[in-house]
Structures are given as structure tokens and as C-alpha cells.
């Protein structure tokens, strides 16, 4: 399977609100497989479909540590039904903003309802890294990036850096074509 490209900041598609999946059909399962391939290749622990340019409410996760067996999770049409008042801080990163990490404060625990890969309704009560990862990826489905949760100063700085890099990459691509 060809590894699909993960779109990068400042690609405007990252700001799109993704649409619910009406049915977990063959096309949805194919997209999930492509998401895992791209996520593991990166490598990363979570991916939202929009990061492959597909505005669908699908998330793939695998929070297993290197020495642990893989633990792939598919979260479709997630709904945040509860969040704790207590906040926790994690250093977050994003495959669409490579090599940039910043501490983000979010609710420490959440309950999320979703549909699994078999189309069955599920509910997960999450704490720790899973709670953070779920919130980070659900944000993606709503066009929100983790840098929206940090200071404007830091956000502007990282957007500027990635905008400059994207312009340079476009220039380089054009030059190699000429
Ligand atoms: Ni991300």
C-alpha cells in the first residue's frame, strides 16, 4: 500500500470541520487502513482523517509503547460526552506540525462515545495519555489544532515558520519541474 502524504500546517484543509461517517463501509475501512499505514510510517500515535485531506470524522490511535504489542484503535464519529473539571498538562505534538512540541492543558479525564470499525456503538472513559490523544484528535475533526491551545505569541511564531517552509517547498518543487 502506498503511504499517503500527511498534510502540513498551514494547509487550509486542517481548518475544515469533518463530516460524520454515515456507514462504516468498504470505503471507510480502506481509509482507516491508509490512515494506520501513514500513522505508523510517520511514526505517530494518532491521526485524524483530515490529515490525509479527507474531511471524515475518523480517528486512528495506537498508544502502545515501542516494546509493547501494537494496540490499534479506530474511533468513528466521536462525541465528547463528559470532561473532568480537573485539568492535566501534556507535551503535545502533531504529525501536521512535525518536530514542534508544546505543553497543553486539557481536562484530565473524558468520556467519549463513538462507533467502532464494525459499526458498533462504543463508549470509553479515558484518563492520561488516552484522554489527551482523544481530545487532540477530536479537535482535528472540528478544524482545531493543538497550537490553538497555546499562547498567541508561540502560535504565530510556529505558523510563520511553517508558512515559510511551505513557500520554500513550493518554490523547490517548481524549480525541479522547470
Ligand atoms: Ni494532530
Image (cartoon, rainbow, N blue to C red):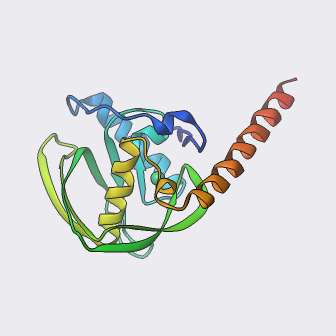
Q: Is residue 47 above or below residue 28?
A: below
Displayed quadrant of residue 106: bottom left
| Residue 39 on image: x %, y % | 47, 51
In the visual, does 169 lie left or right of 36? right
In the image, farthest residue toward the front? 152
Please give the name of the residue rendered at 20% of the width and 30% of the height, measured from the top-left corner. 23
Residue 139, image x, y percentages: 37, 49
As drawn, is 45 to the left or to the right of 128? Answer: right
User: What residue is shown at x 62% (from left), y 59% (from top)?
Assistant: 153
- Give whichever of 45, 154 is nearer the camera: 154
Which percent across, then down, holds residue 79? 21, 47
Image check: 96 left or right of 124? right
Quadrant location, the C terminus: top right
Q: Residue at x 60, y 41 (%)?
A: 10
Q: Nearer the viewer, residue 52 or 117?
A: 52
Instruction: Give residue 6's position: percent from left, percent from top.
Output: 54, 43
Residue furthest top in the image: 178
Q: Is residue 145 left or right of residue 142?
A: right
Quarter of the view holding residue 110: bottom left
Residue found 37% across the figure and 66% down from its top: 63
Amino acid at each position: 500500500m502506498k503511504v499517503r502524504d500527511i498534510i502540513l500546517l498551514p494547509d487550509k484543509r486542517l481548518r475544515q470541520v469533518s463530516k460524520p461517517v454515515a456507514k462504516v463501509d468498504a470505503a471507510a475501512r480502506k481509509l482507516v487502513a491508509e490512515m494506520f499505514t501513514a500513522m505508523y510510517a510517520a511514526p505517530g500515535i494518532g491521526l485524524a482523517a483530515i490529515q490525509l485531506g479527507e474531511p471524515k470524522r475518523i480517528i486512528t490511535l495506537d498508544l502502545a509503547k515501542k516494546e509493547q504489542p501494537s494496540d490499534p484503535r479506530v474511533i468513528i464519529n466521536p462525541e465528547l460526552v463528559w470532561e473532568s473539571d480537573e485539568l492535566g498538562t501534556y507535551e503535545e505534538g502533531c504529525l501536521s506540525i512535525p518536530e514542534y512540541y508544546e505543553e497543553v492543558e486539557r481536562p484530565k479525564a473524558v468520556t467519549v462515545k463513538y462507533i467502532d470499525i464494525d459499526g458498533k456503538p462504543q463508549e470509553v472513559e479515558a484518563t492520561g495519555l488516552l484522554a489527551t490523544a482523544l481530545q487532540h484528535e477530536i479537535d482535528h475533526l472540528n478544524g482545531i489544532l493543538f497550537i490553538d491551545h497555546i499562547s498567541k505569541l508561540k502560535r504565530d511564531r510556529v505558523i510563520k515558520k511553517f508558512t515559510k517552509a511551505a513557500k520554500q517547498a513550493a518554490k523547490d518543487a517548481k524549480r525541479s519541474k522547470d
